């Protein structure tokens, strides 16, 4: 199977993310287009989406999976990002290195387990290396079992664990992948990527 990926420019990409999160994802995160634009506008970023046919109407191609990543710097002004950097200080080297933060992503329920997230992840890694990034970081929670399983399968390593005082399911798990030719050599998906404005 050849995965059909689209890389979006910021404004259109933000609308696509809002649409897929609002209507098709089963967890209550739901970023608005405005939030996406605000987060990404001043930093290097990538908005990637996978598309696939509807099973009962194969002529209809729909977005089924997405990943949004952005640069994370040692000194961030946004309080959320500053907090993120502070939590990672002990385990991520920022000096002289480019860090990509995998911010949001997911696959629509009916299309899970078909390799769309792997294809997006591999394409993101190609882009990250080509753009000078050294490492990709991602944050999840203990209770996001599917995401943890997928990240393990995609060879992301746990680098930090922040226990929740309230419920262990809410504890944060930080994972990372260091980039290099070995990462590209491990890729398996066949993909075609188009650019959308
Ligand atoms: C996690 C998620 C993105 C995976 O998407 P997907 O398109 O189904 O993933 P893929 O089919 O590309 O699978 C990627 C790899 O992870 C593995 N994987 C995916 N889901 C898995 C699961 N539930 N259990 C075990 N392994 C899993 C696949 O086997 C695959 O490995 P392989 O290529 O070596 O066989 C999707 O299940 C999802 O959106 N879940 C909800 C996300 C969520 O909880 N978000 C909370 C915020 S982090």
Image: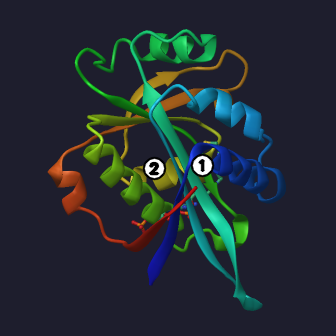
Residue at the outermost left position: 181
Residue 138 percent location from the top left of the image: 48, 36
Mark 1 residue CB less than 8 A from any atom of ligand 1: yes
The answer to which image quadrant residue 8 occupies is: bottom right
SS for dot 1:
strand
Residue furthest front in the image: 197
Please tell me how crowded label 2 is: few (under 14), some (14-19), or many (20+) other residues with Cα within 10 Å.
many
The residue carrying pointer 1 sits among few (fewer than 14), some (14 to 19) or many (20 or more) residues within 10 Å by Cα, namely: many
Identify the residue under disc 1.
Answer: 105
Q: Disc 1 and disc 2: Cα gap in Å?
A: 12 Å
Residue on which disc 2 sits: 151
Quarter containing ligand 1? Answer: bottom right
Q: Pick the residue in front: 161 or 131.
A: 131
Percent coordinates x, y for residue 156 in the rendering: 37, 44
Residue behind label 2 places its C-beta within 8 angstroms of ligand 1: yes
Q: Give x and y (percent) for residue 17.
A: 69, 50
Pair 1/2: label in front: 1
């Amino acid at each position: 199977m050849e995965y059909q990926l689209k890389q979006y420019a910021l404004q259109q990409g933000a609308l696509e993310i809002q649409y897929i999160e609002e209507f098709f994802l089963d967890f209550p995160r739901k970023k608005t287009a405005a939030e996406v634009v605000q987060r990404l506008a001043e930093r290097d970023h990538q908005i990637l989406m996978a598309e696939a046919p509807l099973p009962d109407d194969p002529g209809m191609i729909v977005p089924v999976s997405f990943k949004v990543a952005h640069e994370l710097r040692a000194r961030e002004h946004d309080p959320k990002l500053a907090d993120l950097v502070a939590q990672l200080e002990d385990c991520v080297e920022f000096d002289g290195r480019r860090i990509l933060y995998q911010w949001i992503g997911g696959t629509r329920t009916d299309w899970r387990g078909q390799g769309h997230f792997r294809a997006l992840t591999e394409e993101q890694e190609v882009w990250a290396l080509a753009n000078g990034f050294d490492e990709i970081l991602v944050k999840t929670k203990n209770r996001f079992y599917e995401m943890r399983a997928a990240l393990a399968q995609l060879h992301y390593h746990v680098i930090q664990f922040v226990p929740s005082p309230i419920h262990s399911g809410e504890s944060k798990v930080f994972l990372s992948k260091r980039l290099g030719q070995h990462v590209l050599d491990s890729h398996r998906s066949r993909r075609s990527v188009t650019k959308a404005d």
